[in-house]
Image (tube, coloured by chain):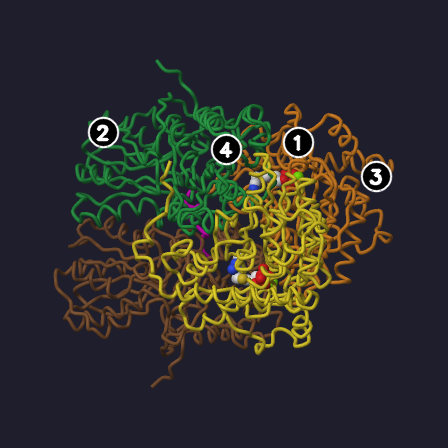
Chain colours: A yellow, B orange, C brown, D green
Amino acid sequence: MVHSIDKMKKKQSLEIFKNLLKIRLTEEKISKEYAKQKMRCPVHLSIGQEAIAAPLKFLLSKKDIVVSGHRAHAHYIGKGCDIEKFIFELYLKEKGFARGKAGSMHLFDKKNGFYGSSPIVANAIPLGVGMGYFNKINKLNNVVLIFFGDGATEEGVFYESLNFAAVHSLKVIFICENNLYSVYSGLKFRQPKSRKIYKVSKSLRVSSIRADGNDIRHTTKTLLNTLNFVKRNSKPVFIEFSTFRFVEHCGPNEDDHLNYRKESEIKKWTKKDPLKKMYSFINARDKILLSKFKKKFNDRLNKIFLKAQKLSYPKSSVAYTNLYDEKN
Amino acid sequence: MVHSIDKMKKKQSLEIFKNLLKIRLTEEKISKEYAKQKMRCPVHLSIGQEAIAAPLKFLLSKKDIVVSGHRAHAHYIGKGCDIEKFIFELYLKEKGFARGKAGSMHLFDKKNGFYGSSPIVANAIPLGVGMGYFNKINKLNNVVLIFFGDGATEEGVFYESLNFAAVHSLKVIFICENNLYSVYSGLKFRQPKSRKIYKVSKSLRVSSIRADGNDIRHTTKTLLNTLNFVKRNSKPVFIEFSTFRFVEHCGPNEDDHLNYRKESEIKKWTKKDPLKKMYSFINARDKILLSKFKKKFNDRLNKIFLKAQKLSYPKSSVAYTNLYDEKN
Amino acid sequence: MMKKIKFHQAINKALEFSLNKDKKLILYGLGVSDPKEIFDTTIKLQEKFGSDRVFDVPNSENALTGIGIGYGMMGGRVVMTHQRLDFSLLSLDQIINNAAKLFYTSDGKFSVPLTIRLIIGRGWGQGPNHSQALQSLYAHIPGLKVVSPSDPNNAYNLLISSIFDNNPVIFLEHRWLHNQEGTLNKNIKKIKLLEKVSDGKDLTIVSNSIMTVEAIKANEILKKNNISCDIINLLSLNPIDFKRIIKSVEKTGKLIMLDIDHGHISVSSEVISYLVSYNKNIFKKEPIKISLPNFPTPTGPSLTKSFYPNFVNIIKASEKLLSKKVVIPKRNLDEIKIHDIPYTNYTGPF
Amino acid sequence: MMKKIKFHQAINKALEFSLNKDKKLILYGLGVSDPKEIFDTTIKLQEKFGSDRVFDVPNSENALTGIGIGYGMMGGRVVMTHQRLDFSLLSLDQIINNAAKLFYTSDGKFSVPLTIRLIIGRGWGQGPNHSQALQSLYAHIPGLKVVSPSDPNNAYNLLISSIFDNNPVIFLEHRWLHNQEGTLNKNIKKIKLLEKVSDGKDLTIVSNSIMTVEAIKANEILKKNNISCDIINLLSLNPIDFKRIIKSVEKTGKLIMLDIDHGHISVSSEVISYLVSYNKNIFKKEPIKISLPNFPTPTGPSLTKSFYPNFVNIIKASEKLLSKKVVIPKRNLDEIKIHDIPYTNYTGPF
Ligand SMILES: Cc1ncc(C[n+]2csc(CCOP(=O)(O)OP(=O)(O)O)c2C)c(N)n1
Ligand SMILES: Cc1ncc(C[n+]2csc(CCOP(=O)(O)OP(=O)(O)O)c2C)c(N)n1
Ligand SMILES: [Mg+2]
Ligand SMILES: [Mg+2]
């Protein structure tokens, strides 16, 4: 676990770079394979937003918890969760982490501290706050990270949750990935023009900052500083990361032909592609290492996807298990 | 209707003073009669908070609309609604405005622009916003006033409603009567210490102010200026009035023996009693006029209450009417 | 012959008709004006009626419902859409505490002419939070009306009559119906409570929404096996027109009750219970309820396969009720091999 | 003889026992630590267990429910209280979309040991928004357990077994029971699904919560008229132990179904439907359902008088089922003259 940016070793930052690549490659592979209609569940890809999640594995312990919403792949992979079980689950196979009950919209990896993602906008936010309350009164120094989009900040439960975290001084980090859109609706249809989301949370008395979500150096630093702040002060923090999604809201393809986003906007953000950005500043040696990693990881992905397709489906009777927890 | 404070005639301000007295006297009468157990429904009295509602009748037209929450008597009386039908309804009699279906927690007077009060905390707030939207797109220049307490600002729907009003620039005035408590829970158990409610609404991009809710001069001026601002600019405004409740949360009695509020706090606010405050600055002539009014109004109240007690109850079959509106 | 139209077009036409008829009608919900226009049901409406009357909204289901109620209390009409019924659970306070009660509590002073379109998901991995039908939950609440179309024609007429009803109406719109074809036979009056889809003497099938499509498929097969069914399509689940159901079951003595929702405490249970409380001898055989299991919806296709009943289940139930073997043509069985998409060229993701 | 305690004390003792037993149990809700302490049910608990574990909250029902779920997913246990069931409608997204499904969706990885006490109001002008019982709504949802005590003893045992159940449990607590007296007979194991309150042969009465109190009153009178009843008190509405009900009705052939909620699509309908689907000849007479009307609750006493059924309605139904006249002592009839308060020294307002 990394504790300070200055002391962050080269090796560690390289790992973070790899993690970014890992998310991108996995998402691209999903996007490519989706057309074959074997992953029969809606997917909300994170392509374009990976820099926010990439540092997670290296900044957090397994006991630090992440929860998220519908666009959760990056957070799951970024946290260092089980990729095999994830892909198997996307294929809805017996060997998936929930034996095909969950799919892309409900990610879980308890062992690695991923405590769920929910496709109902904003509805995992209070779960994370409750987890923070558990940590607090059981005197655990772990942190809970709650990921959601700009659209989620329009749901009442968002405000209720921030308020509770503030009243009880919980070690919870609220992370808003503001990609300017909710499905096809731009912010202007949903929030007043002059609104700053992080200023709203600030007015609720949660320490709040805004940061560039597409530059891995900024995201790493921001997250690390926030983690240190939260642990030191036992207080929640809200981070608004500005970012942009590169594929359609839901599904594997681009959707720029629909013209809901201005060309100029898309251009501007394409330049800020977190992957390109990363390559723009890393040194030649790292580039070589990354390209080796890319090849290796792609091989691994290919194997996982091939295996996933061959694996068997759960029997239909599995649908009728685990409604209630009757262990006791 | 009053349009400017400077032009406000003596006579008009006297009417506002009378209205304050009217609310107080009615609430005190309810409080006194409640013990007889003939008003068989919960009542949330407004005693102590009357100065906010007293100017309404004189600043608003009948087409300007008021909605409110559980503590709505003052708003109903302040808006100039039908007092007889109100008292008859508290007695749950056939002649009440809803033939005993509603009682104290659900006030209505359509003719006078009182479009409902709800005992579910915060749940009339979006109704008022929807009414404002109706005015907007039908190009009506009327204003909607939405009353609620400090506790209501913890409900998610409050934020959602403000956001919609801001996005659509509605002529809606959100009026928070911050009396520091929600039932017996002080603000410190419910909101972070340094929170300012009006600053939260400001961060949501609703023009927001805070004002003294116990001085009839301030409340009148604040409301009048706000009304003018809202009509001129076609924008919502949020007002936080500081105030204090003098009787128990629900019911007719005092409850200071329960010690949930500090003695010093109670003392401080008793000094700020809106009625006392008013008497402290009005001239001798007005005092005489008010005392005449008091006598006359008390006589009227006595008659109404006597009549209410004698009136007949609705038949039990009335319970089985008006479930659906089948006129068409 | 009349021109065929699709279900989603019927919805669109009904909305257009209503927006034309009542200038105070507004229509909103996430996506009503976005490029996908709620599965094409709101296509061109913003263009035609302006963004004051047809508009996209913030993610605020509870407030938006209250806003619709308030708008209605002023004398306007409202259609609100949720792309999934599951999202409307955020607004049950407004639906149950306000919409369902304001006319009653105000003793008739304020009506709430609000129609809420709830789109029910299914298949292609919609899973536990994007496929709930929960019709029994809504239909339990006095003060709400709850309706559900099953084809383009009744969708058109039912949506218009819901919009012009002065009460809050929950309009249950199954995603799998959007692509169905049919002809329009305009006939808009009050909300029609049910319709007979088939007349027969051996068996009564009571159904609604997508299950009526399955009932019709089953009926084709049963006919070929010389079994004739009364099929009653419930357009309204609250209120329910019990009289017509009683009449049919008094004739056949045999009932298959189809339900798109979980069976425990359901519309189906209500119908069965009502019938036997009316006449203890009404059933010549134990009635059979076919509903979703009392489980959340799993996501994967191997798990949903047995989760959603189809015409085969209806036929099996008929065999049981009539003590008779029924032959199902192979062609029909082939149809259900790919069971998790509404039509063959559907490629997800929604 | 055992000491008598009141229902609210039984709740309090159950909470105290549980807080002692599991140090990770927390208890919160509006008013749990205020001077009225939820009708005395949480009396002294904050003092004993500290404000980290027993605490008052902001008015944020939806988030608070999610917070309880998240706390439970970490391995804690939670009791949450709403002073009126009506307030919980704000939190149905969390209850239905999360609490009821997380164990299932995570395929058993995360349980949600959350007990939600919902207090059902009645009388003294509680009206449409402070008296809803809606048990059928909750019991319809797979993944929730729904229970309801009817006396101090089953309240005590049921609350503890709900708290130590690893699933989300909706605990329906009727305000009018708080003052009832009884003796404790501690016997905490798993959630008990039902209990026989009386054994008889002429008639089966199935009931729950406050209606069981009415059933017991009716039974006293029926006994004097030489009518003996099986009374089955449903402690659990989801799941329901149908077997024991079947057994009783197979014996008596006559059923009165009592319900504290509206009758349309209700627990009562489910029971009746289940029985006849099991055996079409089970009823020797048409079963009778006694429930709230399908109307919101009116506020005034002259309107609630016929709204809430009581033992007289049960006796009338028995007369009908048994074709026999029953004499009700005048003393009993006098009891219901003041019908809108739970006990004579109650003076409102809540
Ligand atoms: C309560 C609810 N309302 C609506 C939806 C439909 N929906 C799914 S994702 C989404 C977009 C949310 O936008 P945002 O929070 O900004 O996340 P992004 O997709 O941009 O990452 C919406 C509206 C939903 N899933 N849940
Ligand atoms: C949704 C909901 N939660 C809880 C309650 C119980 N309750 C009734 S009034 C009240 C106090 C609200 O406080 P505030 O908004 O400050 O109004 P005040 O009583 O101080 O005027 C509460 C919590 C309720 N009626 N509705
Ligand atoms: Mg977004
Ligand atoms: Mg207050």
Task: Identify the image quadrant of the N terminus of chain C.
Answer: bottom left
On screen, residue A22 above or below C278: below
Q: Which residue is mark 4?
A: D25
- Toward the viewer: D44 or B266? D44
Q: Is mark 4 within 8 Å of ligand 2?
A: no
Q: Is residue B264 left or right of residue B150?
A: right
Is residue B320 a member of the stretch shown in magenta?
yes
Q: Which mark is residue B247?
A: 1
Q: Is mark 1 within 8 Å of ligand 2?
A: no
How far apart in space, not on screen, are marks 2 and 4 (Cα)?
Answer: 38 Å
**Badge nearest the viewer, 3 or 2:** 2
Chain assignment, label 1? B
Q: Is residue D190 left or right of residue B243?
A: left
Q: Residues within 10 Å of mark 2 (few under 14, many from 20)?
A: some
Q: At label 4, which amino acid type do we have?
A: Leu
Q: Which residue is mark 3?
A: B286
**Badge nearest the viewer, 1 or 3:** 1
Task: Identify which residue is drawn at 23% across, 75% down.
Answer: C331
Ligand 4 shows up in the quarter that is top right
Q: Residues within 10 Å of mark 3 (few under 14, many from 20)?
A: some
Instruction: Note whether residue C115 is visible.
Output: yes
